[in-house]
Image (cartoon, rainbow, N blue to C red):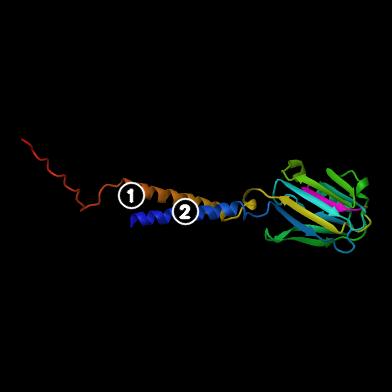
Amino acid sequence: MRRAFAWLLLLAGIGCGAAGALLLTVLAPPGTLAVAVSPAPGAVAVVTAPGVLDLTGPAATVSARAAGGEDVFVGVATARDAEAWLDGAARTEVTGVGGSLDEPVARAEQEGAGPAADPRAADVWIATAQGDGSAALTWDTASDESLAAAGGAVAVVATDGTAAAPAQVELSWRLRGEAAQHPGGVPLAVAGAVLVLLGAAGLLLHRRRGPRPGTRTPDRPARQETA
């Protein structure tokens, strides 16, 4: 009975370990979290709220594409400087991300009215990217005390500040830590390892055990004395 129970533990451990390995590799969540943002009608810019760029991951990427091939501008500035550049202009502000890792959804609000200044002529940007028809900028999300004191870093996507914002905007983050793992992967792998050890120990003890109580060792035949 004990031998059968040890085998049961061993097989259960192998199953749990295999399931945990699958959840951590083949069935692991995607390595990036990406959401699409559609600018509201009349918006001349898409802006992220403070903290959105630092949502997760070691880096965030902001990419945009304009349907008509217009010049696309992507910039990162402090929240204070970005607000000064917008000066109340019509923009779509991304306030966060909802949904699940498999189907994330951007939460956005429409703010302001009217045009903004040309972002290409402003000197408020910490980092920029420009291109004909499309542009992308990757931002290191590591914390910075000076940025935090100025309200944090925000991203701005625009064309020339007066024309409509690029029609296709995407925010994506490279995931790390628990966000990049299936929640059941590590527990299953650990449980599997423990069960395998217990089962193997049970089988080893069963093999080393001596004769069962109540059993007799066969008597050796008596030696015959010869004259």
Three-letter amino acid code of the residue under disc 2: Gly
Mark 1 surroundings within 10 Å by alpha-carbon count, few (fewer than 14), some (14 through 19), many (20 or more): few
Q: Nearer the viewer, residue 139 or 201?
A: 201
The residue beneath circle 2 is 13
Judge left or right: residue 120 versus residue 7. right
- In this rendered view, identify the residue nearer to me: 105 or 28: 28
Q: Pick the residue in front: 75 or 212.
A: 212
The amino acid type of the residue labelled 1 equals: His
Residue at 88% across, 64% down: 41
1 or 2: tag closer to the N-terminus: 2
Residue 152 among magenta residues = yes
Q: How many numbered badges does the structure rendering display?
A: 2
What range is drawn magenta here? 150-159
Q: Is residue 46 left or right of residue 148?
A: right
Query: Farthest top residue?
Result: 227
Callout 1: SS: helix
Measured as percent of width and height from the top left, residue 39 is found at: 84, 61
Q: Residue furthest front?
A: 227
Query: Which residue appears at 92% of the width and 59% of the height?
Result: 114
- Label drawn at residue 206: 1
Residue that protrudes farthest toward the bottom in the picture: 41
Taking depth in this image into account, of 52 and 3 the one nearest to the observer is 3
Distance between mark 1 and mark 2 Cα atoms: 18 Å
Q: Which mark is residue 147?
A: none
Q: Quadrant of the C terminus?
A: top left
What percent of the width, then of the height, locates residue 135?
85, 49
**Where residue 120 sits: x, y (%)?**
92, 47
